[in-house]
Image: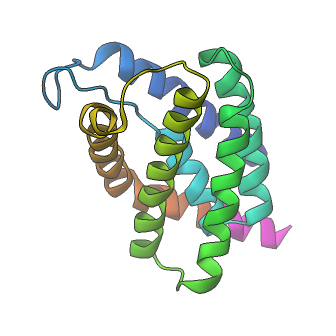
Amino acid sequence: MKKFLLPLLFLFLFILESLFVQYVPTDLLGENKIIAPHFLFAALLFLTIFVSRKQGIIYAAIFGLLFDIVYIEIIGIYLFLFPFIAYLTSKILNILQNNFFVAILITIVGIALLEVGVYEMDHLIHVTDMDFMSYLHLRFYPTLILNALFVMIAGYPLKRLFEKHMDAMRAE
C-alpha cells in the first residue's frame, strides 16, 4: 500500500492544479493576471530534495510527459524541463546545506526557472507573442506569488511525508 502513496499524491496534485485553474477566480491577484499553479512540480522538487535525486528525476520525467500529453500540444517541453530542473536542484544541494528553508528557496527558484523556460520555449516556437516585460507582470510574478504561498503552506507536510518515505525505504 505504501508503494502507491507517492504516485497517488502526485496524481492528486496533478488533478488539483487543473481544479485550481478551473474554480479559482481569474482576478485573484489582479485584473488580467494569469496564475499557473505548479503544485505538482513543487512536490517533485521536494521529493528530489528530501528523498533522492534518482526518484525525483524519474517521477519528474513521468509526470512531465503526462503534463505534456494532457495539457500541451507539443510533447517535450515539460518532459525535458521537469527532470532537468530536478537534476539542477539536486546539484545545488551539493553546494548548499540541506534544510527546510533552503528547500523552500530552491523550490521557488525551480518554479521560476520552469516558468521562464516554458515562456522562452513558447516564444521561440511562436506559441506566444507576449514580450518579456508583459510576461513578467502578467504571468511570472502572480504565478511565483501563488506557488510560494503553496510551498510555504504545504512544504512542511510534504517534507514530513517524504522523510517517512525515506525511512521506509531504508527499512526495506
Foreground residue, 74 or 27? Answer: 74
In the rendered structure, which segment of residues is drawn in magenta? 165-172
Residue 132 falls inside the magenta stretch: no
In which quadrant will I find the N terminus? top right
| Quadrant of residue 80 within the rendered picture | top right
Q: Position of residue 123 (x, y in %)?
A: 52, 29
- In the picture, measured across the screen, residue 42 lies left or right of residue 171, that is left
| Quadrant of residue 129 within the rendered picture | top left
Q: Residue at 40% of width from left, 67% of height from top?
A: 105
Q: Is residue 63 visible?
A: no
Q: Is residue 61 above or below residue 18?
A: below
- In the picture, measured across the screen, residue 20 lies left or right of residue 67, that is left
Q: Residue at 66% of width from left, 69% of height from top?
A: 90
Q: Is residue 86 above or below residue 33?
A: below
In which quadrant will I find the C terminus? bottom right
Colour scheme in use: rainbow
Q: Position of residue 60 (x, y in %)?
A: 70, 45
Residue 168 falls inside the magenta stretch: yes
User: Magenta region's main secondary structure?
Assistant: helix
Q: Residue at 53% of width from left, 37% of height from top?
A: 120
Foreground residue, 125 or 20? Answer: 125
Callout count = 0
Q: Position of residue 96 (x, y in %)?
A: 54, 84
Q: Position of residue 71 (x, y in %)?
A: 59, 17
Q: Is residue 65 visible?
A: yes
Outermost residue on the right side: it is 172
